[in-house]
Image: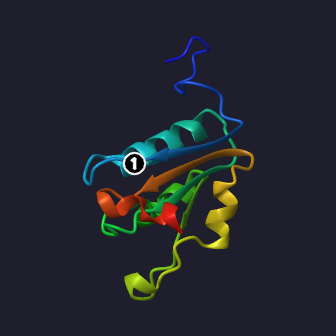
Amino acid sequence: MSKSGSSLPWRPSRRVLLFSGPMGSGKTEVAINFALAARREGVRPVRIVDLDFVNPYFCARERAKELGAVGVEVISAPWGRARGDAPVLTPEMVGALKGGEGLTTVDLGGGPAGGLWWEV
């Protein structure tokens, strides 16, 4: 805890936090828990941009309804198509990544393919 009694290391005003690391290292859980902590601290809006295109089986979008109920918006690519056909960054994702008010956490896929979206 910080000296102010906050569970966050700083008071976000316009922040984008990127969580990356090896596959299975807990990036999604950290991104979700950080977003929930920010929301509890009164940060608004709080968003999670789900860019885990590597392993779409355990991802923030699976918990979108639950997170939305407590004020955390989950932004992810549409998955109604084949994986290779999904747009890498939707306009909504780009807007969140520009770092408007509040906090945006980014859950990036693990492994060598996890960072490929940066090349687009």
Residue at disc 1, secondary structure: loop
Foreground residue among 98 and 41:
98
Residue pictured at 52% horizontal, 36% vertical? 37
The residue positioned 40% from the left and 63% from the top of the image is: 52
Foreground pick, 21 / 102? 21
* Residue located at (66% from left, 34% from top): 12
- What type is the residue that disc 1 sits on? Ser
Q: Which residue occupies 58% across, 37% down?
A: 38
Q: Is residue 7 left or right of residue 116?
A: right
Give the percent coordinates (x, y) of residue 113: 34, 64
Dot 1 crowding, Cα within 10 Å, few <14, some 14–19, many 20+: many
Q: How many marks?
A: 1
Extreme-right residue of the structure: 101
Seen as rendered, the residue at the extreme top is: 3
| Residue 66 x %, y % | 48, 59
Task: Please tell me in which quadrant of the rendered image residue 114 appears.
Answer: bottom left
Question: Where the C terminus falls, by quadrant?
Answer: bottom right
The image shows residue 99, relative to residue 34, as above or below, that is below
Image coordinates of residue 25 in percent, x first then y, are 27, 46
Residue 1 vertical position relative to residue 77 in the rendered view, above or below: above
The residue furthest front is 119
- Image vertical order of residue 19 relative to residue 119, above or below: above
Position of residue 56 measured from the top left corner of the image (x, y, whole percent): 34, 69
Residue tagged 1: 20
Q: Quadrant of residue 94?
A: bottom right
